[in-house]
Structures are given as C-alpha cells and as structure tokens.
Amino acid sequence: MNELDPRIVRLGIEMNGKLKTYDDLAISATGSKFANALQNEAEIRVSNLSKADREYLLTETSPFNLNRTPKRIVLDAGRRSTGAARVFVGDISSCIPSQPPDITLTFKSSTGQFQKGNILARSQAGAAPLSTIAKQVASDLGLTLRFEATDKNIANYAFAGGALKQVDRLGEAGGVNAYVDDHTLIVKNDNVALSGEARVLSEATGMVGTPEITEQGIKVKYLFDTTTRLGGALTIDSKLNPAASGHYVIFKLNFELANRDTPFYWIAQAKRAGTRR
C-alpha cells in the first residue's frame, strides 16, 4: 500500500431506507462490470461490523425474510489525492457470515437484481425515436439516461417481461450498445467510446505486467484509478508488447480492491476501436 497517498475504500449499505457508510473497517471486493445486458456483479467482504448492524443485515437479506424490498450496496474507491469514484452499485442477493472471532460478512450483489422480478409491458404506437424508448426504459428502472447513440425511429416497439430485460430489448431494437453502469442507463453506438471518457495506459502510468492480445482485442491489468469508465476509451502504449498498442473501447471491467491488503487493480478487456461486432 502506498502510505504517501492512502487508499480510500468506502462501502455504503442501505439500512432502514438510509445509506450507512463504512470506511474504517477492513473492506475488500472483487467484481465484474459488462458493457452489455449482463448484470454487473460483485462480492464484497467487510469485517467487524457492530453486532446490531450485522444482525440487521443477516436478517434483512435472509431468503426467509418476507420483506422483498431491495437492499442496496454501494462501493466507492480511490486515493486521498484524487478522491473516490463510484465503482459498483447493486442489490444484495446474499449475505454470509464467517466464524468468530473476526466476523466477516460476505455480500453477493448484482446490478438491477430487484428489477428482474418487476414484470411490465410497454409499447409504442407506430414509429418512435430510439431516444424516447430509452427514456422510458431508464424511467422504469429508476436510472439516469446517458444517450450517445445515433437516434433513429423504431417501428412498432413492444416489450413484456422483467423490467431489467428491457435493456437487452433496447439494444436489439436499435442495433446499439445498451447497458447499466451503476445508476446510469448508457446507450451508445457499438464499439464507439463514451465521449470524454479516456485512459492512456503504459508501463509508466500504472500498467501491471504485459497486455494480452485476445480474440476480441486486449486484456490488461493496471493500478486502480478514478478515470477509467466502462465503455470508455483505453489507449495502450506498451514497450514490452508493441503489437498491443493502440486505441480500444472497454467492454468489460473487473476490479480487485482492498484497503488493508495488496489488491487495488482494474482488469480491463477492450476491443479495438472502430471494428465491427
């Protein structure tokens, strides 16, 4: 850990309708974020919560609890010099305690998990702009819309099913890249980076090891930063593997974070910018 620029790992857990935050306990997390209709997922561990908080969370997240309201969990990370950025937002699907004396709760969470069971039907008479349909989907999911796709008219749009599946339907109907990232529904052109979201990466700026060329593009591990965005641009400048250098669009982000242990990384998978599906 870099003591000259201490890490920030902050966990927020919804309790009784309010978000309670923790940053002074041992917290670690791993997870995956996808720039498609797959749900983002995380496994988050926190040690030595108070007995009252621990018992509340174990009760509220129990499969036997008849209160079916969503239990939100929020993860932020960064460094003191840059501040913290949002890493993950999701609904808790399970909470498992470890054995004493240092009791650790392990939360498993997925983005939009609660919305999967919210059944609805939507339709548009005649032709409707893709942006209008996207606004409706964002409203149904309680999300902010970031629309950067080429707008077009969609004829006879219709949907019936779980609310979260609308994201997949939206992408299919418009031939665009639609996905949920934290509190935002993002709709953009396929394999085009989000505007204003770019990370330049080299051995001198946090790259760990050598970037790996894959069938879809590239896979690279680097020190956690607050500028990387799912769907954003990633420019690689590698001296050890020059063939991997170039401009990419991130389609998957894994994170490995801890405030009292070694991991503090992004692992990005990205596709060469401008290439087709």
Image (cartoon, rainbow, N blue to C red):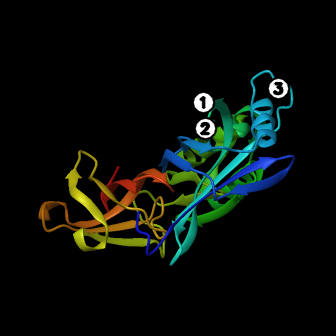
Residue 165 in the image, given as x and y percentages of width and height? 63, 38
Nearest-to-viewer mark from 3 and 1: 1
Quadrant (top left, top right, bottom left, bottom right) of the N terminus:
bottom left
Question: Three-letter amino acid code at disc 3?
Answer: Asn
Q: Nearer the viewer, residue 184 or 187?
A: 184
- SS under mark 1: loop
| Label 2–label 1 contact, CB within 8 A | yes
Q: Residue at x 57, y 50 (%)?
A: 26
The residue pinned by badge 3 equals 65
Q: Which residue is mark 1?
A: 98
Mark 3: secondary structure: loop
Amino acid identity at mark 2: Asp
Q: In this orientation, does residue 152 appear? A: no
Q: Is residue 67 left or right of residue 275?
A: right
- Mark-to-mark CA distance, 3 and 1: 20 Å
The residue furthest front is 101
Residue beneath label 2, please? Answer: 102
